Image (tube, grey):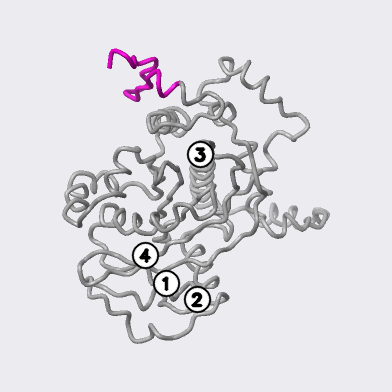
Amino acid sequence: MAGDPVVLDFENAEVRTSDYESLKPEGWLTGEIINFYWTFLERREFRAEPAVLFLGTYTAYRISNAESAAVTDSISAQLSDEMQQHQVILIPLNHRSHWSLLVYCRLTRTFYHYDSISKHNRDFAERAAGRFLRVLEPRVKEGFFFKSMQTPQQNNDYDCGVYVLAIAEELARRFINNKRERGRREDAPRRPAAAAATVRDKPAAAPASTAQQQFPHHTQRRSHTTPAAARAPLSATVTAATMAPPGRAVASDLLRPKLGKPFAGLYSPFTHIYPDAAGGFRPLEPMLRGGGVGPDELVGGGSGSRGAASGSARSREDRLRLEEAMMERAGLPRDFWLVTVEDIEYP
């Protein structure tokens, strides 16, 4: 477009003047800015890491707003082979001019939804999850799980896109690091008995703090970051942006969100989504109130029946145990999908 020229072409991700303007204070990030950042993360920050896929905004919009199963099946025929190699898919959702992040983990067969304005996109995300499953898992006839995550909240009406970028980058880096660490543990030779004895003879470590006991995954990961007192202010980060070493995702610092209400908690109930008779998916809302079915009672073939034990009550504790069992089978810590204010304030 002559009146809206391209100002940046990065790996076929074009940023036009109007997109660049959205980076100004109080601007709403455009889909092209999100696509640019997705491309930057894939090609520079997380290159050669096929485990994570950053789904483009155009494809995400087509799938989330598909009007029929025929549309999602058509998209699946085009993309399903490419999708199968990814274990985590990061999906930007836009509904009523608000961005939120939907994350699908193939290992737990669960969609995790992060919304920086409470439950603004919650219902839309649940409906979209069923459509995405038809594309991401075209041969799966069972149900899946949806979890609305406690998310750091914005304190204005324009930072939703920044939260999507910051949370997605944090989760992608976390999953890739976890995958690499598990690979190292599996490949490491067994230590000699003498070395193990030496380790046992070392003085005991100091007792862990309450935060370390509650969120060990995060405190261990953060032990390798720069102390808060030594971090440069945002103005210095912007000034030194061009001096950053190759592959460092400085955009997460430049687009730092204005953090609002602090993180409120760890768990929220998650919903089991099951196929209906028409071949679509719909949420089994009773699970939010203590009912629902477990993974051994999932329906198949789109019949819509809930199974013999569908009427049994499932307490909050039962749901948490179910979730913890799924995470353990996937080799992920209990609090793996938790994102706190600290995680995205200091990426």
**Residue at the (62%, 48%) spot, across then down:** 340
Cβ atoms under marks 3 and 1 closer than 8 Å? no
Q: Amino acid at mark 3?
A: Glu
Q: Amino acid at mark 4?
A: Phe
Q: Earlier in the sequence, mark 3 or mark 1?
A: 3
Q: Which residue is mark 1?
A: 285
What whole-number distance in Å separates the C-alpha atoms at marks 1 and 4?
Answer: 13 Å
What whole-number distance in Å separates the C-alpha atoms at marks 3 and 1?
Answer: 31 Å
> Considering depth in this image, is 42 or 186 the residue closer to the camera?
42
What whole-number distance in Å separates the C-alpha atoms at marks 2 and 4?
Answer: 18 Å
Region rendered in magenta: 1-20
Q: Earlier in the sequence, mark 3 or mark 4?
A: 4
Work out whether 262 lies above or below 236.
below
What whole-number distance in Å separates the C-alpha atoms at marks 1 and 2?
Answer: 7 Å
Q: Which residue is mark 4?
A: 144
Element on which disc 3 rests: helix
Q: Amino acid at mark 1?
A: Glu
User: Which image quadrant: the C terminus?
Assistant: top right
